[in-house]
Amino acid sequence: MTSDAAAVPSRVADSAFLLACRREPVPHTPVWFMRQAGRALPEYRALREGTSMLQACSTPDLVTEITLQPVRRYGVDAAILFSDIVVPLQAVGVGLEIVPGVGPVVAEPFRSAADLDRLPALTPEHVPYVAEAVRSLVGELGRTPLIGFAGAPFTLASYLVEGGPSKNHARTKALMYGEPELWSALLDRLATITLSFLRVQIDAGASAVQLFDSWVGALPAADYRTLVQPHSAHVLRGVADVPRIHFGVGTGELLHDMGSAGADVVGVDWRVPLSEAVRRIGPGKAVQGNLDPALVFASAQVLADKVHETLEQGKAAEGHIFNLGHGVLPETDPDALLRVVELVHAGFEGPSAEGR
Ligand code: CP3
């Protein structure tokens, strides 16, 4: 194992995270966690006391501090901006709230062509607090890269059309299949907003971006390709100056097409082993994932074995960024995540003789 001092790169571009995104040799497998900032951390809960989620997201000092908390505690290889996928929608005037324990709730769901007028283009003036937080973070983070992010058009459309979180995305699918022209116009608007929101973060100094299409796993691949992928591809083409990670949950059948949408790194949930994911995605991409976030509740030995298994399977990839298969669960013990980071950084060369 390399000493910490030896592993510190001189420039952010040489960080293990960005090297892995570019499929270049790494000093150790980089690791960060989706939703690494949040309720699992007591210091987060203390700071958020009395402030709503959307208020917190628009306060640069709070965004900066909350983004840094998991970097300090876990020593992860990347920070991710503290924000939410619905922040740009609220910024352009969509009435919504983030309800604790529920998620985003939209006051007036999207129903007809007239509602397109409620989705104007986003300009940097809509989100001055995002650029300010990113600039302050880039200064504080030094050689640790900052990941910017946004929601992909399908997942944003799902919240807008359903009016909130949904298991079956029934209204969304009814619109998508029943009124394909309106669907296309809606996704066009959302792609424009998402692309501008990512540009604000990149132009302020974010080193990479992740496009979250969390709920797109609800679609068959053929429909994904015709009704969703072109809009995600539009977003990803516009941010080609930084590494682009593209992730969704339950996307085993879509991995190849999500890569083709223009990702440099394809995020994989825990349902598909990384070695199989690499086969499905094909050459020329790095992968990110994919430890089941529930495994932090298992014994230390089981957790360590699963971390090692994930590292081993990740060797099939041209680049591997270790992560969970979805976000950190709020009940997670932060010490378990700290152990995961230590195990990933220590590396794994194969099963050890002892203790097996
Ligand atoms: O990863 C990070 O540390 C950055 C922060 C981040 C948040 N939301 C903060 C947040 C990121 C990357 C997101 C993206 C996001 N938001 C997604 C895509 C990622 C995924 O999980 O698939 C989605 C689908 C949303 C919508 C959303 N916002 C949900 C489902 C929730 C959880 C609702 C709940 O209370 O359980 C939110 C709220 C939210 N976003 C919280 C955080 C830390 C919890 C709110 C709180 O702490 O009060």
Image (tube, grey):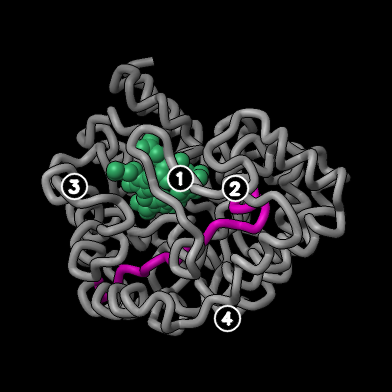
Residue at image mark 4: 241
Point out residue 190 in the picture as x, y percentages from the top left corner: 64, 64
Q: How far apart, in angstroms, are the residues tagged by discs 4 and 1?
A: 30 Å
The answer as to whether callout 4 falls within 8 Å of ligand 1 is no
Residue at image mark 1: 104
Q: Is residue 167 left or right of residue 28?
A: right
Camera-side residue of 192 and 2: 192
Give the residue at x 65% y 51%: 110
Q: How far apart, in angstroms, are the residues tagged by discs 3 and 1?
A: 20 Å
Residue 347 is a magenta residue:
no
Which of pointers 4 and 1 indicates the residue nearer the eye? 1
Q: Is residue 243 left or right of residue 15?
A: right
Q: Which mark is residue 44?
A: 3
**Lower position in the chain sequence, tag 3 or tag 1:** 3
Q: Quadrant of residue 240?
A: bottom right
Q: Is residue 38 left or right of residue 92?
A: left
Question: What type is the residue that disc 4 sits on?
Answer: Asp
Local crowd size for mark 2, using a 10 Å CA cut-off: few (<14), some (14–19), many (≥20): some
Q: Which residues are magenta?
A: 141-157
The answer as to whether callout 1 falls within 8 Å of ligand 1 is yes
**Lower position in the chain sequence, tag 2 or tag 4:** 2
Q: How far apart, in angstroms, are the residues tagged by discs 2 and 3?
A: 31 Å
Camera-side residue of 118 and 238: 118
Q: Quadrant of residue 100?
A: top left
Residue at image mark 2: 109
Point out residue 224 in the picture as x, y percentages from the top left corner: 80, 48
Q: Secondary structure at mark 4?
A: loop
Which of pointers 3 and 1 indicates the residue nearer the eye? 1
* Image marks 2 and 3: residues in contact by CB distance under 8 Å: no
Give the residue at x 75% y 60%: 113
Q: Secondary structure at mark 3?
A: helix
